[in-house]
Amino acid sequence: MINIQKIKQDFPILSQKIYGKELVYLDNGATTQKPIQVIEKLKSFYSEINSNIHRGVHYLSNKSTEEYENARKTVKEFINAKSTKEIIFTKGTTEAINLVAFSFGETFINEGDEILVSQTEHHSNIVPWQMMCKRKGAKLVVIPAKANGELDLEKYKLLLNSRTKLVAVAHVSNSLGIINSVKEIIDEAHKVGAKVLIDGAQAIQHLKIDVQNLNCDFYTFSGHKIYAETGIGVLFGKEETLNQLSPYQGGGDMIKTVSFEKTEYADLPFKFEAGTANYVGAVSIAEAIKYLNNIGLQEIENHEKELIDYATEKLLEIEGLKIIGTSKHKTSAISFVLEGIHHYDAGLILDKLGIAVRTGTHCAEPTMKHFGITGTIRASFAIYNTKEDIDKLVLGINKVKLMFG
Ligand code: PLP
C-alpha cells in the first residue's frame, strides 16, 4: 500500500504555506514538483561529477558520460525500448515533436501527403505539423472528437488512406485528462502504412508505457512532468525509422567526420543530439525514474485513479459546475467550468486559498473551440496528492461561488 504522507515528505516545496495556507498543488499537468532524491542527485552531480560528456579523456568527463549513458539505459528500460539507440535526449516534448516533424518531413513527405492530428491536441502537437505541411505542400487533417471529448475512431478510420504518412496524437489529453485509445489508433494507421507519433507528455508519469507493446513509431515526453528537471525530454523512435531520417540540427557530437566538402553523421542516437546535451537533466530523469520504480508504477496508477474518481464524484456534487470531457477513460486531470464565473477569476481566488490550479485554454485552443468555451479550470494530480487536497479544492470552489453570489 502506497504511503502518501511519506511520499509528500519527499517533496520539500509542498511543506510551505502560501498566503498563510497550506499549499495544495494541483497544477501537475503543467509541471510536477521534484523529490529530494532528484534535488540531492543534482547537488551531488554538480559537486562531484560535472564535466562535459563524450569529449574528454579525463576522469570527470568519463564519469559524466557514464552517468549520461546510464540515464539513457534507464529510460530505455522504463519504456521498454529495444535499444538505447532508440532513445534521443531532447529539450522536451516540444523539441522532440519538432525534431520528427522536421526530419520525417525532409525524408518522407511530399506534396499532397496527409498528416493526421486530433482535435484535442496540445499546440505542441499541432503547430510543428502545420509548419511541416507548409514547407512540404502537405495537408493537415483533423481527427474529430466526440461530445464527451473522446476521439471519434470511426471517423478516424475513414480519414486514413494511402496519402496518410503520419498520425500524431496525445496518449493523454492535457486539457481533458482523457486517455486516448492509442493502441487502436496505431494499429489502424499501420494498416495504411502510416507512422505514428504518440505525445506522451501527460501519460508517462501516470501510466506504464511499453513502446514495443504499443508498437508506436515515435513516443515523446518531458522530464519536468515526470518529477525531473526542465529543459530535458525524450524522443523514442524505432531504430529502423530513425536511421532513415535526416538529422534535425547540425553541430558537435552528431558527426563522425567533418570537412568542408562533406560531413559524415554519427550513428544513433548521437545523430540527433547536436551540441552539448543537457546531460545533467538526463541524469535527473534517471533519478526520477528510480524514484517512481521504488514506489511502484502500478501503485501510482491505482492511487491516481482513485484521485480522479474521487474528484469527479465530489466536483459533480457542486451545483453549476460542469465537467468538460466526460469520458470514463481518464487519468489525473479534470477540467471544469463554473456557471457565471470566469475561469480566471476562480483561479485567482483559489490561489488566495493556497490552491494552485491551471486556468485558461491549456495550450489547446482547438479543444476549447470544440466545446464552445474560452477556457476551463483544470486540477491535475500527481503521486503526492491526496483526497484531502480534493476536499480543499471543493471547499475552495464553494467559496468562489459564494463570493460571486
Ligand atoms: N504535449 C502535451 C500533451 C503537453 O501537456 C505538453 C505540456 O503541457 C506538451 C506537449 C509540451 O511539453 P513541453 O512544454 O514540456 O515541451
Image: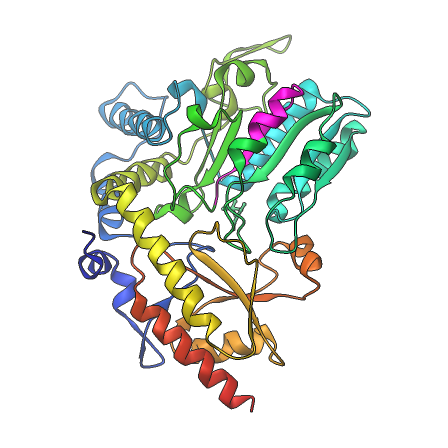
Q: Nearer the viewer, residue 335 or 108?
A: 335
Give percent across and percent down for residue 334: 48, 61
Q: How is the image coloured?
A: rainbow
Q: Residue at coordinates 48% horizontally, 16% vertically from top-left?
A: 239
Which residue is farthest bottom?
A: 405
Q: Is residue 236 left or right of residue 206?
A: right
Q: In the figure, 77 relative to 45: above or below?
A: above
Q: How many marks?
A: 0
Q: Is residue 207 left or right of residue 328?
A: left
Q: Residue at coordinates 63% horizontally, 26% vertically from top-left?
A: 189
Q: Residue at coordinates 36% horizontally, 53% vertically from top-left?
A: 305
Q: In the figure, 71 relative to 221: above or below?
A: above
Q: Quadrant of residue 245?
A: top right
Residue 96 in view in this figure: no
Q: Is residue 156 left or right of residue 332?
A: right
Residues in magenta?
186-201
Q: Nearer the viewer, residue 281 or 139?
A: 139
Image quarter where the C terminus lies is bottom right
Q: In the figure, 10 relative to 117: above or below?
A: below
Give percent across and percent down for residue 359: 55, 67
Residue 142 in view in this figure: yes
Q: Residue at coordinates 41% horizontally, 48% vertically from top-left?
A: 224
Q: Nearer the viewer, residue 293 or 119?
A: 119
Q: Quadrant of residue 100?
A: top right
User: Is residue 402 on the magenta stretch?
Assistant: no
User: Is residue 194 on the magenta stretch?
Assistant: yes
Give percent across and percent down for residue 400: 49, 83
